[in-house]
Amino acid sequence: MARPYKPGLEYFPFDVDLLKDNKLRRPKMKYGYLATAIYIALLTLLYEDKGYYIPYATQNEKEDCVWYVLNCLQGKYQPDANTVAEVIEELVACELFSGDRYPENITSKRSQSVYYSATVERKSIVIDDAIWLLSLDEMKNLSEKHVYYLSKVTQPNNRVNRPKNEVNRPNNPQSKEKDSIDSDDNAREKKSQVKQIPQSNFGEQLQSFCKKFGVEIDTNSSYVADMDFAELSKAYADSRFFLQNRVFAKYLSWIVKNYESIVCGKYKDQKQEDKQEESYWDESADRLNAVFEKLNEEL
């Protein structure tokens, strides 16, 4: 009988500097020991179950994750479900977990590097490209023998195998001239479509947006200058329950990384869902507290 496939790990390396990571400073200042304890609990769930991520998209997945953490932290100073969810958002905001994959999944480059190195000897492995963060160069630096890396570098390159039709095209100067004119027209049209922010107003628009929605300016990325703050303000106004109440969405670095998703309205329709989720977490906390009170009485 074939051995059942287990995606997760039996153990993971605990770096000696893990608890001294500067990214943990802000969560520890806000939540004390809970930030560290919840971070470690999430890592054990991540590596034990899927190996490199925690599914967190649905209410059931969030409940499973929070209950796992609460089970790890059970005892006299156990937090409630709402606090665990808040700490998770703070860990994402501080980039201990990737904001690019949150809130659908909880993962990070660091955890994926650990998983990649730990599974080098496996003959087969299933990795979701939509969740994976490591580039080919990063995987190559870790190991060139990994089956996932080999599957990527050995994929046929269709561009190499395409016939070079340019060689067989007739040498028609008139056609080349027309192509050049069309190319120039297209370039001018695209350039005219790009909405430029006057540099003199850029700083004022940035400060105004951040002040209005309580966003912390924690990056000096050059991409900030390309953002349309009118569109951002509209997106934040349309997503009051999500963008205005999520810790990770209060940092400019997260906004830069997720700019396209924000202005395209990805979070616009989550208002009602967040209302239900807020009520759901309140009810979950009440149920948990009732259970623990009963256990304390029995003990």
Image (spheres, helix red, strand yellow):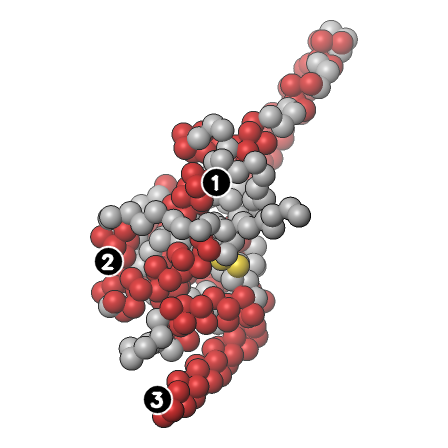
Residue on which the image places disc 1:
119
The residue depicted at 44 percent of the width and 30 percent of the height is 143
Residue 94 drawn at (x, y percent): 33, 56
Q: Residues within 10 Å of mark 1 (few under 14, many from 20)?
A: some
Up the image or down, 78 lies above or below 89; here it is: below
Comparing 87 with 140, the one in front is: 140
Quarter where residue 87 is shown = bottom left
Question: Which of disc 1 and disc 2 is earlier in sequence?
Answer: 2
Residue type pointed to by label 3: Leu
Question: Which of disc 2 and disc 3 is earlier in sequence?
Answer: 2
Residue on which the image places disc 2:
25
Quarter where residue 58 is shown = bottom right
Residue on which the image places disc 3:
299
In this rendering, does residue 226 appear at all? no
> Which secondary structure, mark 3?
loop
Is there a contact, CB below 8 Å, between mark 3 and mark 2? no
Residue 43 drawn at (x, y percent): 39, 56
The residue depicted at 45 percent of the width and 33 percent of the height is 139
Residue type pointed to by label 2: Arg
The residue depicted at 37 percent of the width and 62 percent of the height is 41
Q: Residues within 10 Å of mark 3 (few under 14, many from 20)?
A: few
Q: Quadrant of the C terminus?
A: bottom left
Say left or right for 67 vs 19: right
Residue 20, numbered label: none
Q: Nearer the viewer, mark 2 or mark 1?
A: 1
Q: CA distance from mark 3 to mark 1?
A: 44 Å
In this rendering, does residue 47 appear at all? yes
Q: Residues within 10 Å of mark 2 (few under 14, many from 20)?
A: some
